[in-house]
Amino acid sequence: MREFKDIINTDNITFLSPWPGGARFYWKYNDLDFLVLATDNDEDHVSISHSDRSIKPTLEQMIELKNIFFKPYECAHIYMKQDGKKLLVSNCYHIYRKHNEIA
């Protein structure tokens, strides 16, 4: 995962507050404000959601967010809701990388 200083120097990323093992951010993408939670406990993990549950991140947005939080050589996985699956928060998607995965 990229260094904190590199993440907060990215356009459209605003640091909100510390979070256990990470931090909370706002990410402005076009006219949308997403809440982003990034942690690095057992794995590097980024969650993204919008306050309006009908707004779900697109694959394009997820890839852009991955590029903000992860280094180009890191193998990060994007998890998006698949049709028919019920999630606790239906518009909260995830990007993660296990610490032992580097390429």
Image (cartoon, grey):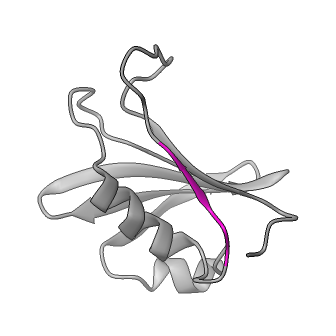
Quadrant of the snapshot with the N terminus? bottom right
Q: Residue at x 34, y 61 (%)?
A: 27
In depth, the one of 63 and 47 nearer the eye is: 63
The image quarter containing residue 69 is bottom right
The picture places residue 12, in percent across and down from the top left corner, at 30, 73
Quadrant of the snapshot with the C terminus? bottom right
Is residue 55 rendered to the left or right of residue 50?
Answer: left
Answer yes or no: is residue 77 visible.
Answer: yes
Is residue 70 rendered to the left or right of residue 60?
Answer: right
Where does the magenta region start and end?
A: 74-79
The image quarter containing residue 38 is bottom right
The picture places residue 29, in percent across and down from the top left corner, at 23, 63
Answer yes or no: is residue 41 visible.
Answer: no
In depth, the one of 12 and 102 nearer the eye is: 102
**Which residue is the extreme one toward the left?**
31
- Give above or below for 80 relative to 33: above
In depth, the one of 31 and 23 nearer the eye is: 31
Q: How many marks?
A: 0
In depth, the one of 84 and 21 nearer the eye is: 84
Q: Residue at x 22, y 36 (%)?
A: 55
The picture places residue 90, in percent across and down from the top left corner, at 39, 23
Residue 28 part of the magenta-drawn span = no
The image quarter containing residue 4 is bottom right
- Give above or below for 38 relative to 47: below
- Give above or below for 89 relative to 25: above
The picture places residue 43, in percent across and down from the top left corner, at 78, 54
